[in-house]
Image: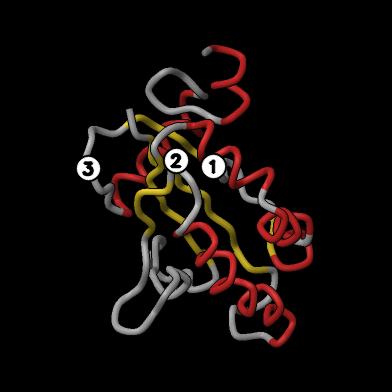
Amino acid sequence: MPIAQINVSRFRRPKADPANQPFMDALDHVNAQADVADGFIWRLVGEGDANDATAIQALAGDADFIVNLTVWRDVPALEAFAYRQADHRSVMARRGEWFEPVEPSLALWDVPEGHIPTVAEAMEKLAQIGRDGPSAAVFTFRWWRENR
């Protein structure tokens, strides 16, 4: 069964600050690699020419809070990209330079074949994991590895 994932971050400085430029510059490349990764199905992008979701406001009034929302064939496919794809890993290694800690920042959940989650649905899953902790309904990589 396909899975959806949301991960969120809040920039330490305003999004347009030059300190964030290395992250912004890496987005197109890393997103292009995700688009062709084994098991990739879909990712949220902005309107018009936007090829990422950084302009989508998941939290009203918080332009520095960004969301990444994707659908994958299964957890192993997402995990392979997230943790073993070199360029993605190098961006993740530097996330502390650009982003404040946010908890929870990640949620995974099963979705029916062909389902494209909305930002509102994904934010509710993130709230659910924050409120109730991981479960079969909404989980983390760690929970999935320990309970599969």
Q: Are marks 1 and 2 in contact (CB under 8 Å)?
A: yes
Which residue is located at x 23 percent, y 32 percent? 112
- Disc 2 element: helix
Which residue is located at x 52 percent, y 49 percent? 7
Sooner in the amino-acid sequence: mark 1 or mark 2: 1
- Disc 1 element: strand
- Image quarter of residue 27: bottom right
Specify few, some or many for label 3: CA neighbours under 10 Å numbering under 14, 14-19, or 20 or more.
few
Res. 122 mark: none
Q: Which residue is mark 2?
A: 126
Which residue is located at x 35 percent, y 30 percent? 110
28 or 93, which lies in front? 28
- Disc 3 element: loop
- Give left or right: position of 83 versus 90: left
Residue type at tag 1 = Leu
Q: Which residue is mark 3?
A: 115
Residue 127 image offset from top left, x and y in percent: 43, 39
Residue 62 image offset from top left, x and y in percent: 48, 69
Residue 26 image offset from top left, x and y in percent: 64, 73
Residue type at tag 3 = His
The CA span between labels 1 and 2 is: 7 Å
Q: Which residue is mark 1?
A: 106
- In this rendering, which labeled residue sits more in front, label 3 or label 2? 3
The CA span between labels 3 and 2 is: 18 Å
Specify few, some or many for label 2: CA neighbours under 10 Å numbering under 14, 14-19, or 20 or more.
many
Residue 95 image offset from top left, x and y in percent: 72, 60
Sooner in the amino-acid sequence: mark 1 or mark 3: 1
